[in-house]
Amino acid sequence: MILEYALKEEDEYKRMTNITRGCQQLAQQLPFYETFTNSNLIRQLFCCYPFQEEPIRLLLNIMMERFQNLEFLNCLHKGLSELSLLQEQKTMLSCRSAGRRRKSQQKY
């Protein structure tokens, strides 16, 4: 999907453009969804939130109003869990690299 591509984009203008396109695409598709079970999309939306707060907030509100069932709540929980795991992994990796730098600096 476009949102995943946008998150990997280094150029800020292209990232914002792709996030906008991804939000538009999702907004057009949502009325046709009977259920929503894509936890990856939930994770991507939350990752895009700092770049486009209002459109993401609106999409999440629409989804929460439209899909008031256990399937969607499980999907939301899974997406948020995946996001928290990414944050934990990022923290662990940054701690490891800081430890390696200290060890290499002690050698000199």
Image (spheres, rainbow, N blue to C red):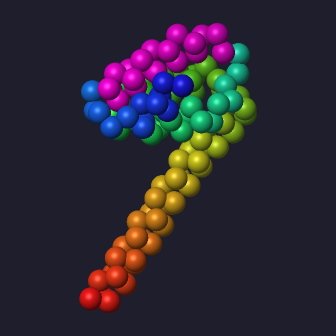
- Res. 57 in view: no
- Res. 88 in view: yes
- Give residue 23's quadrant in the image: top left
Q: Is residue 4 magenta?
A: no
- Give residue 73's quadrant in the image: top right
Left or right: residue 74 versus residue 102 is right
Q: Which stretch appears magenta?
A: 14-33
Q: Please, is residue 99 above or below residue 53 in the view?
A: below
Q: How many labels does the image show?
A: 0
Residue 82 at x, y percent in the picture: 59, 48
Q: Which residue is drawn at 34% across and 82% down?
A: 104
Residue at the extreme bottom of the image, as rendered: 107
Q: Which residue is drawn at 64% across and 43% down?
A: 78
**Which SS does the magenta portion mostly show?**
helix
Residue 47 at x, y percent in the picture: 45, 39
**Residue in front for this viewpoint, 87 or 77:** 87
Q: Residue at x 61, y 19 (%)?
A: 66
Residue 7 at x, y percent in the picture: 42, 36
The quarter in which the N terminus is drawn is top right
Q: Residue at x 36, y 73 (%)?
A: 98
**Residue in front for this viewpoint, 106 or 45:** 106
Residue 10 at x, y percent in the picture: 33, 37
The quarter in which the C terminus is drawn is bottom left
Q: Does the magenta stretch include residue 23?
A: yes
Q: Please, is residue 5 above or below residue 78 in the view?
A: above
